Amino acid sequence: MTSSRVQSLRDWRSYRSEKGRYIYMLENHIGCDISFSVGAENAKGTVHAHKFILISRSSVFEEMFSGEKSPQTIEVSEIPVESFKTFMRFLYTGENHVTSGNILHIHYLARKFRVQELARECATWLLRTINHGNVCAILEHARQYGEEFLFQKCLNFVFSHGRQILLSTKFDELSQQSVALVLKSDYLAVSENVVYEAILRWSTHQCRIRKLEPTGSNKRDVCGPLINLIRFPIMDPRYFSSKVSTDDLLNESEKVEIFQYITSSSGARPIPKGFIVKNRMTNFSFA
């Protein structure tokens, strides 16, 4: 065998497809001219890439690299290294290797860098895979990044499976804004006792995050306007008397007003100020 033939076999270009050559260059840092510092401080890594590939897939990268002060290193601290590598692989090959573990990271990157094809694929993937275990995370993600259709689908799922979702610790991880959007709806198919227990647990979790003692006063502070979205006036009187009235989430004046409303006949009883007295709907379905 001639030396030129041996050299040809050893040359990585000779036996790879165009896509394969790009991936080889990416993984072996051949000719790279841009670097990304990726991940949190305790798990940081560097990913090298080629500007011309990134520009071909993203208008954001084109804007970044076209100016006189084009960066040599870009910080992406909010995403794990492996998820970022999966994103890079899509830019180089068009292959989407999302999993349940990285989908929210990949969708975030696709939105951040305006890779529209990937963003659409991720949104479709998320829509297909909504379940009890992930709906809260997807709902929060969709709200933050303006995915209105996905967000509404998540809300509808929560409304239809209210008890299971509110009893899950995943509910505790929702933001106050997302919890408010869930609680204010008439379509949340769950008893108000369950709503109250969920908010007690959610507020305790929020106190821990903020390093506060989970006292009634502190829990009320972290709840803010959520307190008035709990429909205390439609609660079972026995539950209100035995549970709510012994907690410190409501002040004494509110407890008295609500208890009088609950236990009075349905005549000219005064409506407790600031609280909703309308029953939630239970007989409905979302297409």
Image: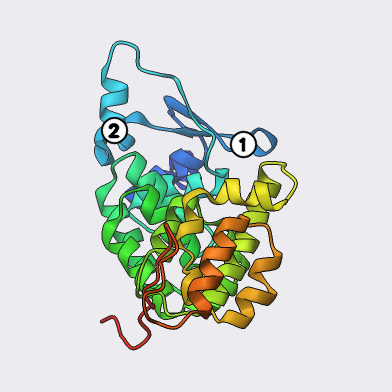
User: Residue 98 has which mark?
Assistant: none
- x then y, percent, for residue 30: 47, 32
Most distant residue in the front direction: 268
Q: Which residue is rendered at x = 53% and y = 72% of the image?
A: 260
Please name the residue that numbered disc 1 is placed on.
Answer: 40
Name the secondary structure under disc 1. loop
Question: Is 163 in front, or is 223?
Answer: 223
- x then y, percent, for residue 277: 40, 71
Most distant residue in the right direction: 213
Q: Residues within 10 Å of mark 1 (few under 14, many from 20)?
A: some
In primary-sequence order, the first of circles 2 and 1 is 1
Q: Which residue is rendered at x = 25% and y = 82% of the image?
A: 287
The reply to whether residue 175 is visible in this rendering is yes
Determine whether, in the image, residue 145 is placed left or right of residue 192.
Answer: left
Tell me: residue 260, above or below residue 45: below
User: Residue 60 has which mark?
Assistant: 2
- x then y, percent, for residue 241: 65, 75
Determine whether, in the image, residue 217 is placed left or right of residue 85.
Answer: right
Most distant residue in the bottom direction: 283
Instruction: Tell me the kind of residue under disc 2.
Output: Val
Instruction: Tell me the kind of residue under disc 1.
Output: Ala
| Colouring of the image | rainbow
The answer for how far apart the CA atoms under marks 2 and 1 are is: 23 Å
Tell me: residue 59, above or below residue 119: above
Residue 188 falls in image quadrant: bottom left
Question: Is 161 in front, or is 61?
Answer: 161
Total labels drawn: 2
- x then y, percent, for residue 91: 35, 46
Q: Which residue is rendered at x = 51% and y = 69% of the image?
A: 232
Name the secondary structure under disc 2. helix
Determine whether, in the image, residue 188 is placed left or right of residue 1.
Answer: left
